[in-house]
Amino acid sequence: MNAEGLVEVVLPGKVEPEGLRIRLGAVPRPGPGEVVIRTEATGVSFAEQQMRRGRYYDQPPFPFVPGYDLVGTVLATGEGVEPGLAGARVAALVKVGGWASHVRVEAADVVPVPEGVAPAEAETLVVNGVTAWQMLHRKARVRAGHTVVVHGANGGVGSVLVQLARAAGAHVIGTASARHHDALRAQGVVPVDYRAGDLAARIRALAPGGVDAVFDHVGGSGITGSWRLLAPGGTLVSYGSAATRDAEGSKQWPVLKLLFRVLLWNALPNRRRAYFYNVWAGRALSRDRFRSRLRGDLTQVFAALQRGEVTARIAARLPLTRAADALRLAESGTVAGKVVLIP
């Protein structure tokens, strides 16, 4: 196993993408209850963009290997792991460590990838897919006939949200820059240019009675506008703070402010609800329950892919050794879908 050699990308500190480093080493060996995955695809998400700025609210100390999720083949199994798992294609949500040719994870954390689903396609739907599924079905409980707003409808999570919402029978209003509007219309989405001024007023014109759900990754001061778009009984799901990506100061403060707003709104005597979504919520309290929910929800997303309800939106495929180019491309805001790294 060690003859293969390990290749991983290291984030040494607060650097521009070109400051990423490539490190070589020995392939790790699995410990008890662990597997080693030979990575076939990993991706660039908003989390890594924040991490390189030191802005992700619970990132580890520098230096570390970024990479929120991955898809690959089990190369080796540790003591106590079913030996038959070796050779299986699996997905894993790891938060950090995914930008590597080989990754060691707990066997209980891997999710089988269905036969016939290519690694890069599956990778686009790991963190993005489970995030979209859980926000749509576990938090907002969107049903046929609902009207929802998806901010960043062309992005990694947003593009999956749009498709899952349409598959659920919802009407979708999607915010995006004008160059993505034709693609959104082709999916049955009503596009709104977020750069054209008074975004909330233009959305209210499309849904005068309010909407049933808003999915907001932007955060910042604009979150209040999202809350005001809700109809009675509506749900706001906040899942990021893209507006403060380049801000200085505490990396926890933007998230804490969002949490405070959510608590305040939910304490008011009204029929609307707000959530701050975190894919890792509940893991510390019950790891088994967290794993079961993750496995079940990601399996549902992969099934939606196989049924054609969701398509894998791959913005670009680049070698792992070109992680700097991939990160720069993902941060450019010019692509639709997810930038995928292929070790």
Image (cartoon, helix red, strand yellow):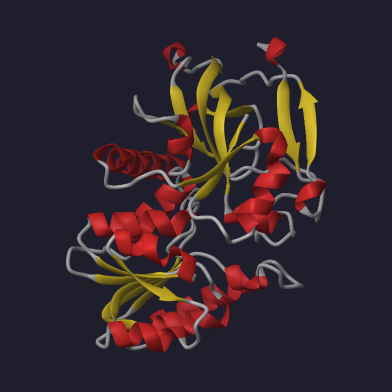
Please, is residue 268 above or below residue 313 in the view? below
Please name the residue shown 47% across and 33% down the image: 91
Please, is residue 163 above or below residue 248 in the view? above
Please, is residue 210 above or below residue 70 in the view? below
Say left or right for 339 vs 244. Answer: left
| Residue 312 placement (x, y as % from top left) | 40, 43
Query: Can you tell which quarter of the image residue 151 is in?
Result: bottom left
Which of the two residues, 76 or 160, is positioned nearer the viewer here? Answer: 160
Which of the two residues, 257 or 164, is positioned nearer the viewer here? Answer: 164
Please name the residue shown 65% across and 33% down the image: 319
Please, is residue 300 above or below residue 279 in the view? above
Q: Can residue 168 be seen from the camera position used here?
A: yes
How many numbered circles does the render carry?
0
| Residue 54 placement (x, y as % from top left) | 74, 59
Q: Can residue 265 be seen from the camera position used here?
A: no
Which of the two residues, 192 or 286, is positioned nearer the viewer here? Answer: 192
| Residue 244 placement (x, y as % from top left) | 64, 72
Please name the residue shown 61% across and 53% down the image: 330
Say left or right for 125 vs 14. Answer: left
Say left or right for 68 vs 23. Answer: left
Please name the residue shown 41% across and 81% down the image: 227
Considering the image in quadrants, where does the N terminus appear? top right
Considering the image in quadrants, where does the C terminus appear? top right
| Residue 47 placement (x, y as % from top left) | 61, 54
